[in-house]
Image: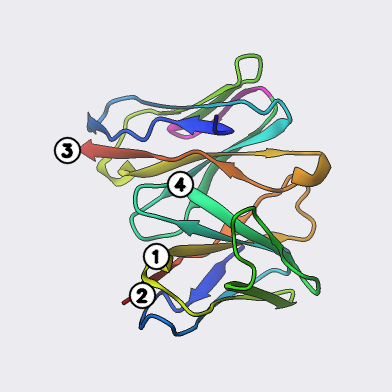
């Protein structure tokens, strides 16, 4: 149980285009989903926290107009990187937290590798 | 000062060795302490979690938390080549606006050679 999927697993796009990444909780309902970015040999950096049906909360320094997050249902959250540039190339990982988890256990997706040319 | 500090390594040990991984932290509000394993180009998977201080053992893995020193450890006994991965410590508070938010260390890259 507690499986989180991401799609696509990797994507290559041209500079200036937009890319959408999906995060799904397959066997549980996730009231909260998190989006992280990870650069090579670096840790996971939290970008934003999203609760189903409400606006995402972005971490300091993360442009909310560039990284659009939608958490439309209890099993799906999407991250759209708008007008992507080469510096946005990174490994994007989502996680999902079941609604009844008191201590904040998060289940992570397999990640999406974005390369912007 | 980062909230969670972790030596990135790399750490290279022979098969069968005991591995010790450590993190320090500065925020006394942290109550939940986790260790994740991440294989290359994959998402992290939870290995162990501990609430507050103390030890927890699961097979070859032992997690220790010393809140007085703000120091946590993960020990791997009889290490195997399949243990080769990056190990990330993570912490979470149980109150206030940070509830549920995980704070990660940088990760330690471990290689166990046969």
Q: At which x and y percent is residue B24? A: 53, 25
- Contact (CB < 8 A) between labels 3 and 1? no
Determine the main secondary structure of the stretch shown in magenta.
Answer: strand
Residue B50 in the image: above or below residue A63: above
Residue with the mark numbered 4: A43
The residue located at (30%, 43%) in the rendering is: B84
Residue B58, visible in the rendered structure: yes
Q: At which x and y percent is residue A31? A: 76, 65
Residue with the mark numbered 1: A87
Q: Give the structural element (helix, strand or loop) at label 2.
A: strand
- Contact (CB < 8 A) between labels 4 and 1? no
The answer to which of A2 and A7 lies nearer the viewer is A7
Choose top left, top right, bottom left or bottom right for residue A114: bottom left
Which image quarter holds the N terminus of chain A?
Answer: bottom right
Give the residue furthest to the left: B114
Pointer 4 chain: A
Q: How far apart are the alpha carbons under marks 4 and 1?
A: 17 Å
In the image, residue B81 lies in the stretch drawn in magenta: no
Stretch in magenta: B53-61
The answer to which of A66 and A41 lies nearer the viewer is A66
Residue with the mark numbered 2: A116
Residue with the mark numbered 3: B114
Q: Give the structural element (helix, strand or loop) at label 3.
A: loop
Q: Give the structural element (helix, strand or loop) at label 1.
A: helix
Pointer 2 chain: A
Question: Mark 4 or 1 closer to N-term?
Answer: 4
Q: At which x and y percent is residue A34? A: 63, 61
Same chain for labels 4 and 3? Say yes or no: no
- Contact (CB < 8 A) between labels 2 and 1? yes
- Contact (CB < 8 A) between labels 4 and 3? no
Question: Mark 2 or 1 closer to N-term?
Answer: 1
């Amino acid at each position: 149980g507690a499986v989180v999927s991401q799609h696509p697993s990797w994507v290559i796009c041209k500079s200036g285009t937009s890319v959408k990444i999906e995060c799904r909780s397959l066997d549980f309902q996730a009231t909260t989903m998190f989006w992280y970015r990870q650069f090579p040999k670096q840790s996971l950096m939290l970008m934003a926290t999203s609760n189903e049906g409400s606006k995402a909360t972005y971490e300091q320094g993360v442009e909310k107009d560039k990284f659009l997050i939608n958490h439309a249902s209890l099993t799906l959250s999407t991250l759209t990187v708008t007008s992507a540039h080469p510096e946005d190339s990174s490994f994007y990982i989502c996680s999902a937290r079941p609604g009844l988890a008191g201590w904040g256990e998060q289940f992570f997706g397999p990640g999406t590798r974005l390369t912007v040319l | 000062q980062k909230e969670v500090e972790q030596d990135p390594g790399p750490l290279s040990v022979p098969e069968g060795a005991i591995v010790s991984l450590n993190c320090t932290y500065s925020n006394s509000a942290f109550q939940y302490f986790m260790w994740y394993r991440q294989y290359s180009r994959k998402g992290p998977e939870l290995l162990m979690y501990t609430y507050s201080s103390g030890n927890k053992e699961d097979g070859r893995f032992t997690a220790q938390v010393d809140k007085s020193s703000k120091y946590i450890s993960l020990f791997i006994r009889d290490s195997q080549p399949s243990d080769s991965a990056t190990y990330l410590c993570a912490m979470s508070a149980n109150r206030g606006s940070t509830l549920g938010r995980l704070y990660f260390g940088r990760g330690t890259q471990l290689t166990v050679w046969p």
